[in-house]
Amino acid sequence: MKKRWKIPLFILILFGTFFIWTGSCKAWGPPKLEDEEKFLQWYEANKNIDGAVYQLSADLRLTMGSEDTPLVWDGQGEVTIECGSHVILVDSSLVIDNPKLKITGNDFIAFMVRDGRLTLERGKVEYGGAGGVIVHNDNIFGFTSQITVLQ
C-alpha cells in the first residue's frame, strides 16, 4: 500500500519537469538576422582593402536591391565573407563583381535565392560542408565565377 502514492508522485514530477524545460525554450519567434544596412556599409568601406573579413553572426537577408538597381558587390580588394553555419538569403537582385571576393560556408548551404536574382560575374564561393548545396534556386546567372566545393 505504501508504494501506490509513489507512482502518481513520480508521474507528477516527471510532467512538471517537462513543462519547466519547455517553458524556458528560446526557439520561439522569428530567427535573428544580420543587420543588412550595417553589412552593406561595411562592404562599401572595405571592398578595396586586402584582408578584410566579415563573419556573419546570423543569416543575412538581402532586400535593398531591385531589378533596375541591383545590389552590387564590386571592388578589387581581397575581401572574405565567412558564413559559417549561416546563409545569405537573396530576396532582391544581387550582382557579385569582385574577382577577389571570397564567400565561405560550411553548413548545408551558402546562398538561398528566394524572391531575387543572383548574378555571379566574378568572385569565388568556397563551400566546406560535408553535404548540401552552394546555391539553392533557379534564378542564378553568369557562372563565370569560381565555385569550389572543399572536401
Image (cartoon, helix red, strand yellow):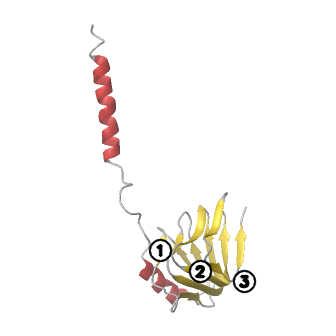
Check the image and report above or below for 8 versus 130.
Answer: above
Disc 2 designates what residue? 118
Quadrant where the image shows the C terminus: bottom right
37 relative position to 145: left or right? left
Q: Give how far apart the Cα atoms at labels 1 and 3 are.
A: 24 Å
Q: Position of residue 92 (x, y in %)?
A: 50, 81
116 relative position to 77: left or right? left
Mark 1, other Cα within 10 Å: few <14 / some 14–19 / many ≥20: some
Residue 52 visible? The answer is: no
Taking depth in this image into account, of 120 and 51 the one nearest to the observer is 120
Q: Amino acid at mark 2?
A: Leu
Marks 2 and 3 close (CB-CB < 8 Å): no
Q: Position of residue 47 (x, y in %)?
A: 56, 88
Residue furthest top in the image: 1
State the residue at coordinates (72%, 83%).
Answer: 144
Q: First in sequence: mark 2 or mark 3? A: 2
Quadrant where the image shows the N terminus: top left
Q: Position of residue 51 (x, y in %)?
A: 61, 81
Disc 1 designates what residue? 61
131 relative position to 84: left or right? right
Q: Amino acid at mark 3?
A: Thr
Disc 3 designates what residue? 144
Mark 3, other Cα within 10 Å: few <14 / some 14–19 / many ≥20: few
Say which element carries label 1.
strand
Mark 2, other Cα within 10 Å: few <14 / some 14–19 / many ≥20: many
